Image (tube, grey):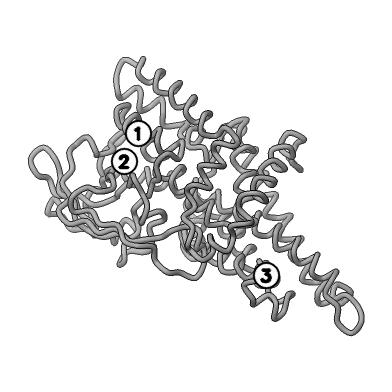
Amino acid sequence: MIDWSDEDVMIRDAVRAWVDEKVRPRMDALDAGDLPPYDLIRDLFRTFGMDEMARSSFHARMEKEERAAEAEASAADSSGDADEVSGVSGGGANASLSILPIVELCKVSPGLVTAMGVSLGLAAGTIMKRGSVEQKRRWGLDLLTMDKVGAWAITEPNSGSDAFGGMQATARRDGDGYVLNGSKTFITNGPYADTIVFYCKLDDGRDPRDREILTFVLDRGMPGLEQSKPLRKMGLHSSPTGELFLSDVRVGEDRLLTGGGGTGAQSGKESAKANFVTERAGVAAMALGVIEECLRLSIDYAGKRELWGKPIGDFQLIQLKLAKMEVARLNVQNLVFRHVEMQRKGRTPTLAEASAMKLYAAQAAAEVTQEAVQLFGGNGYMSEYHVEQLARDAKSFQIYAGTDEIQVTHIARDLLSR
């Protein structure tokens, strides 16, 4: 794949027109954090029939699973195609349909994609991979259609990159259920989430680092569950981020996700690792959108802004900046094209491949946005000019879904283990 197909271009142009009509006029409210993104995302789903596609795919899948003789067979059958159902990472022939909206949305508001991706790809994706048929019907469809908002809660104040080893949230057995305690931070959609996929450790008396990791599904308003107001942060203001506090939250076995071929620590860790691959590969598409927009804006500005009687684009140092942006665009686009082709062939990147994609794309987006701000000079530092927002937003790519340093570790460990 060396370019988008004619059909892809039609999809891209349609999404671009929707973005110009619905998102660009609301950029100030989104970037100020005054406008939660969810109604816009739902409008996107309705406009392009994504909600009906998700609904049709979900019902077909549930009918197939319910015909299976045993629940274990249903879980095994479902584990391989959760990305197709999630509506974010896509799969098969629909790969471009899922990637192109990400690219176009990130040209204007990367936070919209973050909010959507976590709700669909991580919260819904985990339930559709690890849940029973009953659990999928209970929570899955509302998330896949964006009728409800999902959050994926793994990060804690004292764990950060050591998500599993440093995890302190606990689940204590209590009769036929569990009592959950702990806190989570930097949780995308946390303030507004209706459904929360919550990771914690079984409090069984063993050393905390050796305990099993369990995954539960929680609902807004449960006694003992507190969702904070949106946190203030450097960028991605259109993606609400918050904290979760659990104090003796009582849950039954019906909220424990144990499917997908494992239980306890194996199920919880493998579930999270699979989501890391999906999330990290998706950052490349997000970075492409940011890079393309910065390059477009920079070319336009370099042709119009004059110094000493001529456009600044005539100066070689400005030309060097534009050339480096184009190199970054081509490289990140090739990573995205490779990912699309892998999806069309039913292949999933390894954790190392996804980490390599994320590492390069995140760094490229951060460098391009900083160069764009520099090219614009004083104007680039003003919020009136869009490159200022994109520079703040792009920095997050090097932090969430695993920092640059963690990506290096995962890549190197994979290389050394061969």
Which residue type does callout 1 highlight? Gly
Residue 38 placed where, x, y %? Answer: 47, 48
Give me the C-alpha separation between circle 1 and circle 2: 7 Å
Which residue type does callout 3 highlight? Tyr
Is residue 335 visible to the viewer in this orientation of the structure? no
Residue 255 is left or right of residue 89, and the answer is: left
Which residue type does callout 2 highlight? Ser
Position of 339 relative to 112 (above/below): above
Disc assigned to residue 213 = none
Tag 2 or tag 1, which sits nearer the N-term?
Answer: 1
Q: Pick the residue in front: 248 or 262.
A: 248
The crowd level at tag 2 (other Cα within 10 Å; few <14, some 14-19, many 20+) is many
Q: Is mark 3 on a helix, strand or loop?
A: loop
Q: Residue furthest bottom?
A: 308
| Residue bearing mark 2 | 267
The crowd level at tag 1 (other Cα within 10 Å; few <14, some 14-19, many 20+) is many
| Residue bearing mark 3 | 385
Q: Is mark 1 on a helix, strand or loop?
A: loop
Which residue sits at x=43%, y=23%? 59
**Residue 76: quadrant of the picture:** top left
* Image quadrant in which the N terminus is located: top right
**Residue 324: quadrant of the picture:** bottom right
Q: Which residue lies furthest to the left in this view?
A: 175
Residue 164 placed where, x, y %? Answer: 32, 56
Position of 295 relative to 37 (above/below): below
Q: Pick the residue in front: 106 or 361.
A: 106
| Residue bearing mark 1 | 260
Look at the numbered discs 1 and 2 and tell me whether their residues touch, using CB distance below 8 Å.
yes
Q: How many labels does the image show?
A: 3
